[in-house]
Image (cartoon, coloured by chain):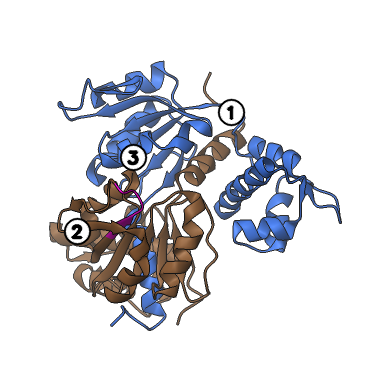
Chain colours: A brown, B blue
């Protein structure tokens, strides 16, 4: 276990991998820290520091082999196996997620979709039939779900998180605008549009300019 | 300008505000750092440290006045004015965003929606008519847009960001899976589902357990 690796490093590793994959498709054989930094919106020193958490990469003066580094980063990010995901909430956000092409392509299989709306339950989304949210424990247990995605109203999220975790889920991607309390072994990532927008209005405000006149 | 305030602090301030607003509705008059910490998924010491960036709040032993602290945090986050937002990309993510109820409620007005799909251009979304993406500069300039939301494919994002910035946008919320290069005065927030999912599969993998068998 590698508790000391900062979240920000993991997120940059994701970006480096995406950049490497584009280079791979273009047939670029090697890449320098500088080039990777430019793609990842950071500095060469940061690239080297981020990678140093995971061992030694590349050769001084030669840079990194694109396919080799991509393969190592895929291992690090756990992308060499497929992950079983349950989507809770078949609303607009849920349906946008479900149709997100990168989802399956990067190894995340949405094995079930749950909702509490009687009009949605029983509908088919591609190969998946929407089930009642009461079946959450059953689904997580029987389908050996690793990750639960919560695309539900804020007031429902905590209880659903607890139920998913009790049934065996190890990680939660939470779209609800609420912080979740989960056991220490469970990982939570947040996608919160309001928080991101507020970070922007904060930044504009602190720059002393306010909104445009 | 307050460049030294960490992003993570700003994001927690958003969460504290949301918790305070719930307490306000419930008629709770005061709150301690401990209670606020619990709601925001952090510690009392962190709450005090986060708030200390912005002056002094609360009274020792009495805690914070809920309406007063909420009002101060709203000021800090720039939520006492309304922000003009253009949405670029009227696909699934764009439409989920557009219908997101918290959006307008928290002061973000989507004044225009742009797309490059001839079948979408001209459609009405509530009071807003979808316009061709060629009108980006016109819209940002004439409607005095503060924030551009990019819900477009990765390969289109950089050029659109540059065009929005050149026309006067000061901040970008980017849903495309790519890091943007923008001038230093422009703020970018990212919502990247793949990055968040990869952070989770990384965490499960690093815990040495791998996927469920």
Q: Is residue B16 positioned above or below B125 on the image?
A: below
Residue topped by disc 2: A128
Q: Residue at x 19, y 70 (%)?
A: A67
Q: Is residue A76 positioned above or below B25 on the image?
A: below
Between the C-alphas of marks 3 and 2, the distance is 21 Å
Q: Residue at x 38, y 80 (%)?
A: A55
Q: Secondary structure at mark 3?
A: helix
Residue A46 horizontal side relative to residue B53, left or right: left
Q: Nearer the viewer, mark 3 or mark 2?
A: 2
Tell whether position A117 is magenta.
Answer: yes
Is residue A77 among what the camera can see? no
- Of the pair B81 and A86, the residue shown nearer to us: A86
Q: Secondary structure at mark 1?
A: loop
Q: Are marks 3 and 2 in contact (CB under 8 Å)?
A: no
- Of the pair A173 and B7, the residue shown nearer to us: A173
Q: In the image, residue B123 lies at what x, y percent? A: 23, 22
Query: The numbered mark 2 sits on a residue in which chain?
Result: A
Q: Residue furthest toward the top?
A: B142
Region of the chain picked out in magenta, as a range:
A113-118
Mark linked to residue A209 = 1
Mark linked to residue B96 = 3
Is residue A156 among what the camera can see? yes
Marks 1/3 same chain: no
Q: Secondary structure at mark 2?
A: strand
């Amino acid at each position: 276990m590698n508790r000391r690796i900062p979240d920000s490093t993991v997120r940059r590793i994701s970006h480096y991998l995406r950049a490497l994959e584009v280079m791979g498709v273009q047939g670029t054989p090697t890449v320098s820290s500088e080039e990777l930094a430019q793609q990842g919106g950071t500095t060469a020193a940061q690239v080297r520091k981020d990678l140093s958490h995971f061992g030694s990469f590349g050769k001084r003066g030669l840079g990194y082999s694109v396919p080799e580094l991509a393969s190592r980063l895929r291992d690090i990010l756990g992308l060499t196996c497929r992950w079983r995901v349950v989507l809770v909430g078949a609303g607009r956000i849920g349906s946008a997620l479900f149709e997100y092409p990168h989802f399956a392509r990067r190894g995340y299989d949405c094995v079930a979709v749950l909702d509490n709306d009687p009009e949605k339950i029983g509908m088919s989304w591609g190969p998946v039939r929407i089930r009642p949210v009461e079946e959450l424990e059953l689904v997580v247990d029987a389908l050996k779900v690793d990750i639960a995605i919560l695309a539900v109203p804020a007031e429902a999220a905590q209880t659903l998180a607890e139920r998913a975790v009790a049934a065996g889920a190890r990680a939660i991607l939470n779209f609800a605008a609420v912080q979740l309390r989960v056991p220490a072994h469970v990982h939570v990532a947040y996608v919160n549009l309001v928080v991101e927008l507020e970070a922007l209005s904060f930044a504009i405000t602190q720059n002393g300019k306010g909104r445009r006149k």
